Image (spheres, rainbow, N blue to C red):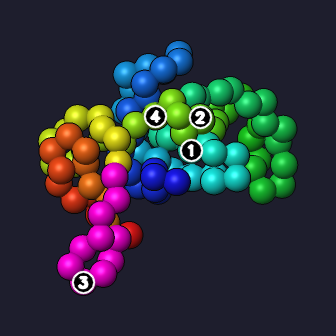
């Protein structure tokens, strides 16, 4: 997957279109990501011994990878991600718009 934990992403379709957030978790098997403050659902929680209080809690739920795009840290635009091999033989992700390296893999 081209999206990793702690990336900043922007939603490109759906009810949360245009929202930006940080990726909290990546689920490769389901091709989904959990993004902070995106696709928030309400869950009815029963009180337990660990959690004294019950009630309705809000938590982010997974969103499909095809609905988000990485926001480039250098140019600040949503972009596709490419891979290139560096001189030392390591693979790095780069922004397809400004061609700056996002991070080393």
What segment carries the magenta color?
A: 82-91
What's the residue at 38%, 51% (across, down)? 7
**Front tag of 4 and 3:** 3
Question: Which disc is residue 102 wearing?
Answer: none
Height in image: 101 above or below 85? above
Question: Do tag 3 and tag 1 residues touch (Cβ < 8 Å)?
Answer: no
Question: Do tag 4 and tag 2 residues touch (Cβ < 8 Å)?
Answer: yes
Q: CA distance from mark 4 to mark 3?
A: 31 Å
Height in image: 39 above or below 2? above
Q: Earlier in the sequence, mark 4 or mark 3?
A: 4
Q: CA distance from mark 2 to mark 3?
A: 35 Å
Q: CA distance from mark 4 to mark 1?
A: 9 Å
Q: Which residue is mark 3?
A: 88
Q: Let me know if residue 9 is in the magenta part.
A: no
Judge by depth and name the residue closer to the eye, 72 or 46: 72
User: How many residues crowd around disc 4 within 10 Å: few (fewer than 14), some, or many (20 or more)?
Assistant: many
What's the residue at 29%, 70% (across, down)? 85
User: How many residues crowd around disc 1 within 10 Å: few (fewer than 14), some, or many (20 or more)?
Assistant: many
Q: Which residue is mark 2?
A: 63
Q: CA distance from mark 1 to mark 2?
A: 6 Å
Q: Let me know if residue 88 is in the magenta part.
A: yes
- Tell me, yes or no, if residue 70 can be seen here: yes
User: How many residues crowd around disc 2 within 10 Å: few (fewer than 14), some, or many (20 or more)?
Assistant: many
Q: Position of residue 18 (x, y in %)?
A: 37, 22
Q: Which residue is mark 1?
A: 33
What's the residue at 18%, 50% (across, down)? 99
Q: Which residue is mark 4?
A: 68
Question: Do tag 4 and tag 3 residues touch (Cβ < 8 Å)?
Answer: no
Q: Quadrant of the C terminus?
A: bottom left
Q: Earlier in the sequence, mark 1 or mark 2?
A: 1
Question: Do tag 1 and tag 2 residues touch (Cβ < 8 Å)?
Answer: yes
């Amino acid at each position: 997957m081209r999206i990793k934990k702690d990336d900043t992403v922007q939603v490109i379709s759906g009810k949360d279109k245009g929202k930006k957030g940080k990726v909290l978790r990546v689920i490769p098997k389901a091709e989904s990501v959990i993004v902070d403050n995106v696709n928030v659902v309400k869950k009815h929680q029963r009180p337990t011994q660990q959690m004294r209080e019950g009630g309705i809690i809000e938590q982010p739920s997974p969103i499909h990878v095809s609905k988000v795009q990485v926001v480039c840290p250098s140019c600040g635009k949503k972009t596709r991600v490419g891979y290139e091999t560096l001189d030392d033989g390591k693979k790095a992700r780069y922004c397809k718009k400004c061609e700056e390296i996002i991070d080393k893999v």
